[in-house]
Structures are given as structure tokens and as C-alpha cells.
Image: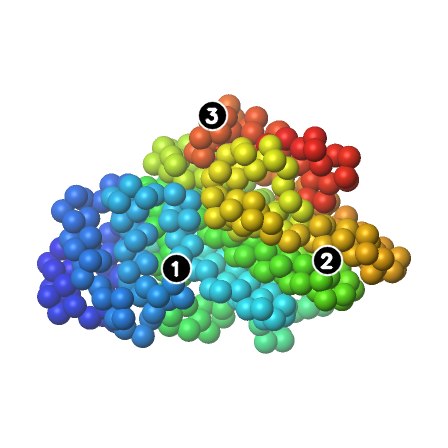
């Protein structure tokens, strides 16, 4: 408190004691921050001038302001999924160039998983990082490293200098790259602002080790959804510009990247259900049903049914819902318009069909794996997003990203 008060008197955001605040937060859990500390942080937030420091974010607010918004979400009664996962500290505007967009996704996912590997590894030392209750066994740490590496390898082959990961070895047997050296290399070359964003974005609600894994998995998926949404928005524009082959390539890349990300679920399945059931008591009100990234990606494939738009699937993401209701163009809608206007030749139509079918099939696998994970982790308990839980996830399994015309009206919420 004294150090924070001293900072408040001097008031320079560049020197804000992030490590001090985060160290304390992680040692007690965000849900249990002391009222006096919360008041002081609230006062500091009020005094942070918008123009302060070089670290002005894309929404015009400084990094410190956004950081304090995340710390104070429960205090403000604004706590939800984006604030729990600290997305405002991690997400960058997706570059419009498709290669740059993929590179940006790869870099962030690599940082998130490298940081997770470092955190897991330190659990077996004498001074593990907080949150440190219920530490994992050495066998569990090794298993998590192998599963994280499976997601990191394809991204590392694209985004890191050649030679860091052995392409031939990965092609022969994926998942064997030693995780420790890979993580060290990624973290060593992180820019200072990336290191700060990485550290600031772990704000667990409680003190159990496994919540770190939960947060980093959610953030890795969210980073992937941001890429998928931006690539699909570009795919719609390419169709509109009569460049269907490029559009099909983009949809295919979206399918590939989602497929590469599926082992994130295997990684998360190593979370101990008893740990999850304990810390989720304090995450009530934050659920990935509020993921704007996921719903943006879904609603760029085709317009969701009226029933789904009226259900909590979309009422939980009002800004995305508004875009859809205002007539957001979709891949399927634009594609069918080209057919109706005789602007699509059969070869291009076939390429689009093949790419859409691949994406559909990977997304079905995503939903099935997510469903099985939820059964394992929460059984018959209700969801933190106020649905019945598993029955909601069972119902959405029948939905399709690219529904056949006769199915569309039959979609469930
Ligand atoms: C312990 C692991 C997980 C459990 C138990 C779980 C459980 C649930 C439940 C019960 C729902 C329904 C909404 C609610 O009431 O909360 C849901 C929705 C959702 N979850 Fe998860 N989830 C898990 C992991 C994940 C992960 C890692 C992601 C990736 C971001 C994710 C993404 C989603 C999305 C996008 C929805 C909305 C689906 C829709 O509306 O169609 N979940 N989850």
C-alpha cells in the first residue's frame, strides 16, 4: 500500500509497480483483494490522464488504465469474460494483410504458451510463481509441455527464424520439440511491451495453480478466433471483388489454424476437475458464451438463425448481435449471391465448397471436444454464463456454420 501511495504522489505511469500489484493479486486471488487496496487503485485509475505515457491503446486509453479496469472489474461490478481473460491487454488490431494477420496470431499464441510452459516448469522449483496452491506433479508438468508444444510447433515453423524448430522432425513426429528451450527462445526475444502485456494478463480469481492454465488456454483460443474473424471478413471482401479462389484459400487457412489449435483442449483436459470446480465458484458471470471473437467468426460464415440470435448465444454478445441484425455480409450469403448472379464458375464454386466443408468438419470436432470437456469438468452443474451447462452445449452441436438452405430455419438456439 505504501509503495502504491508513493507512486500515486509521484504519478508516472511508466514506473507503475505492476509486478508488485500482480504479485499480490496472484497470491490472494482477484476475488479476495482488500477493500482498502481496491479504493486506492480506483483513485489511481481516476487520476490516470488519458494522454499519459507513450502506451496509449487503440481505444485511446493508456495501458495502465486498461490494466486497472481489469483489476477492478469485480469492484466495479463489470466482471465478465473479456475482463476475466484480460483481452483488452492482449488483443491487437488484426492486420488487414492476411499473412500479417496470421503472423500476429502465431506470435501471440507462442508467447502465451511459452509463458505457460515457464510457469508450469517453475512449479517444480523451491520458489514457484503464484498462483501456487495445488501444484501439479512432475509427470503432469511434462504432459502439459508436450501438449502445448503440439500447438506451438506449426506456429513456430511459420513465425520463428528457421532452425529454431526442426521442420523435418516435426513432419516425422509432431510434438517432440523440447518445450523448455523453445519457450526460453520465445520469451527471450519478446519486446518489453509484450512481456508487460503477458504478465499483466494473468489475473486469476483464486490461488490455484491450474487457473493459470485455464486463462492461457482461453486466451490462445481467443487470439485464434480474432485471426479467424479477420480472415473471414477478408474472404467476404474477396468474394465481393470476384476473387473466389483467394476467398477459398482464406477459408481453408481458417480451417487449418482451427485444426492446429484443437490440442489446446487436450492441454486443458489436464486441468484437475477439483481445482476447476473450486475456482469457478468465483468466476460466476464470466463465460465464453460472451466471446465476441467466437460469435464474430461464426456469424461471418453465415447469418445465424433467428432463434439463435434471440438466445443467450447472441444476447451475451450485444455488439456482435447488432452487426448481424444490421445485415453483416457473410461468406455463404456473398457466395450464394455470386451464384445467383452467374458470377461464379464451377471450379471456383468447387474450391469454396471444399474449403467450407473442411471448416465445417473442424468446427464440429471443436464443438464435440468442447462438449466432452465440459461433461468431464462440470457434469450436471450449470454454466457460469447462466445456461443449463452441458444441455446447452449438446443442443448447439446440431448447428452448422454453412447450413444447407433447408436446414437453416431448423437451427436451434
Ligand atoms: C473447463 C473447460 C470448459 C468448460 C467446463 C466449459 C463450459 C461451457 C459451458 C457450460 C458453456 C455454456 C454457456 C455457459 O452457461 O457458460 C460454454 C460455452 C462456450 N464455451 Fe466453454 N467451457 C470450457 C472451455 C472452453 C474453452 C477453452 C473455450 C475456448 C475459448 C470455450 C469456448 C466456449 C464458447 C465459444 C462458448 C459459447 C458456445 C455457443 O454459444 O455456441 N470453452 N462453455
Residue density around tag 2, few if under 14, some if 14–19, many if 20 or more, within 10 Å: many
Residue 260: image location, x then y, percent: 65, 54
Q: Residue 381 got which mark? A: 3
Residue shown at the point (30%, 53%) measured from the top left: 69
Give the residue number, with chain letter if any, for mark 1: 89
3 or 2: mark nearer the eye: 2
Q: Is any part of residue 103 visible from this angle?
A: no
Q: Nearer the viewer, residue 187 or 293?
A: 293
Image quadrant containing the N terminus: bottom left
Q: Label 2: state its secondary structure.
A: helix
Question: Gap in Å between the C-alphas at discs 3 and 2?
Answer: 36 Å
Q: Earlier in the sequence, mark 1 or mark 2?
A: 1
Residue shown at the point (49%, 38%) measured from the top left: 315
Q: Label 3: state its secondary structure.
A: loop
Q: Is any part of residue 12 visible from this angle?
A: yes
Residue 111: image location, x then y, percent: 48, 63
Residue shown at the point (16%, 68%) measured from the top left: 11
In this rendering, position of residue 71 left or right of residue 112: left
Quarter of image, res 206: top left
Residue 122: image location, x then y, percent: 39, 56
Residue density around tag 3, few if under 14, some if 14–19, many if 20 or more, within 10 Å: some
Q: Label 1: state its secondary structure.
A: helix
Q: Nearer the viewer, residue 119 or 391?
A: 391
Residue shown at the point (62%, 75%) measured from the top left: 163
In this rendering, position of residue 380 left or right of residue 171: left
In this rendering, position of residue 374 left or right of residue 400: left
Q: Residue 357 got which mark? A: none
Q: Residue 252 got which mark? A: 2
Residues marked 1 and 2 touching at CB (< 8 Å): no
Residue density around tag 1, few if under 14, some if 14–19, many if 20 or more, within 10 Å: many
Question: Gap in Å between the C-alphas at discs 1 and 2?
Answer: 29 Å
Residues marked 3 and 2 touching at CB (< 8 Å): no
Amino acid at each position: 500500500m505504501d509503495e502504491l501511495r508513493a507512486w500515486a504522489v509521484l504519478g508516472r505511469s511508466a514506473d507503475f509497480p505492476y509486478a508488485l500489484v500482480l504479485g499480490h493479486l496472484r497470491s490472494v486471488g482477484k476475488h479476495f483483494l482488500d477493500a482498502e487496496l481496491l479504493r486506492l487503485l480506483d483513485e489511481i485509475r481516476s487520476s490516470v490522464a488519458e494522454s499519459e505515457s507513450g502506451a496509449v491503446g487503440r481505444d485511446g486509453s493508456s495501458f495502465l488504465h486498461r490494466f486497472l479496469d481489469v483489476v477492478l472489474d469485480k469492484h466495479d461490478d463489470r466482471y465478465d469474460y473479456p475482463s476475466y481473460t484480460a483481452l483488452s491487454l492482449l488483443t491487437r488490431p488484426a492486420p488487414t494483410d492476411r499473412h500479417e494477420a496470421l503472423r500476429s496470431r502465431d506470435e501471440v499464441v507462442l508467447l502465451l504458451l511459452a509463458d505457460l510452459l515457464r510457469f508450469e516448469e517453475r512449479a517444480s522449483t523451491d520458489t514457484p510463481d503464484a498462483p501456487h496452491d495445488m501444484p501439479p506433479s512432475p509427470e503432469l508438468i511434462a504432459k502439459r509441455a508436450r501438449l502445448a508444444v503440439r500447438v506451438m510447433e506449426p506456429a513456430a515453423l511459420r513465425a520463428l527464424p528457421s532452425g529454431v524448430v526442426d521442420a523435418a522432425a516435426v513432419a516425422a513426429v509432431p510434438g517432440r520439440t523440447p518445450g523448455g528451450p523453445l519457450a526460453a527462445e520465445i520469451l527471450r526475444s519478446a519486446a518489453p511491451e509484450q512481456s508487460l502485456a503477458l504478465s499483466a494478463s494473468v489475473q486469476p480469481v483464486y490461488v490455484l495453480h491450474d487457473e493459470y492454465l485455464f486463462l492461457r488456454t482461453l486466451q490462445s483460443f481467443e487470439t485464434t478466433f480474432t485471426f479467424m474473424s479477420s480472415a473471414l471478413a477478408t474472404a467476404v471482401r474477396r468474394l465481393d471483388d470476384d476473387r473466389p479462389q483467394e476467398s477459398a484459400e482464406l477459408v481453408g487457412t481458417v480451417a487449418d489454424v482451427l485444426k492446429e489449435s484443437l490440442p489446446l483442449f487436450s492441454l486443458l483436459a489436464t486441468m484437475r476437475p477439483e481445482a476447476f470446480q473450486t475456482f469457478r465458484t468465483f468466476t460466476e458471470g464470466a463465460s465464453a458464451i460472451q466471446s465476441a471473437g467466437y460469435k464474430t467468426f461464426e456469424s461471418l460464415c453465415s447469418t445465424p438463425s433467428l432463434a439463435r440470435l434471440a438466445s443467450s448465444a447472441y444476447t451475451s454478445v450485444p455488439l456482435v448481435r447488432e452487426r448481424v441484425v444490421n445485415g453483416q455480409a457473410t461468406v455463404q450469403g456473398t457466395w450464394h449471391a455470386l451464384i445467383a448472379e452467374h458470377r461464379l464458375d464451377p471450379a471456383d464454386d468447387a474450391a469454396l465448397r471444399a474449403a467450407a466443408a473442411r471448416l465445417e468438419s473442424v468446427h464440429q470436432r471443436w464443438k464435440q471436444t468442447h462438449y466432452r470437456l465440459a461433461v468431464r469438468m462440470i457434469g450436471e452443474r450449470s454454466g457460469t454464463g447462466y445456461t443449463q451447462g452441458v444441455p446447452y452445449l449438446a443442443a448447439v452441436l446440431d448447428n452448422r456454420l454453412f447450413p444447407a438452405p433447408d436446414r437453416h430455419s431448423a437451427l436451434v438456439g
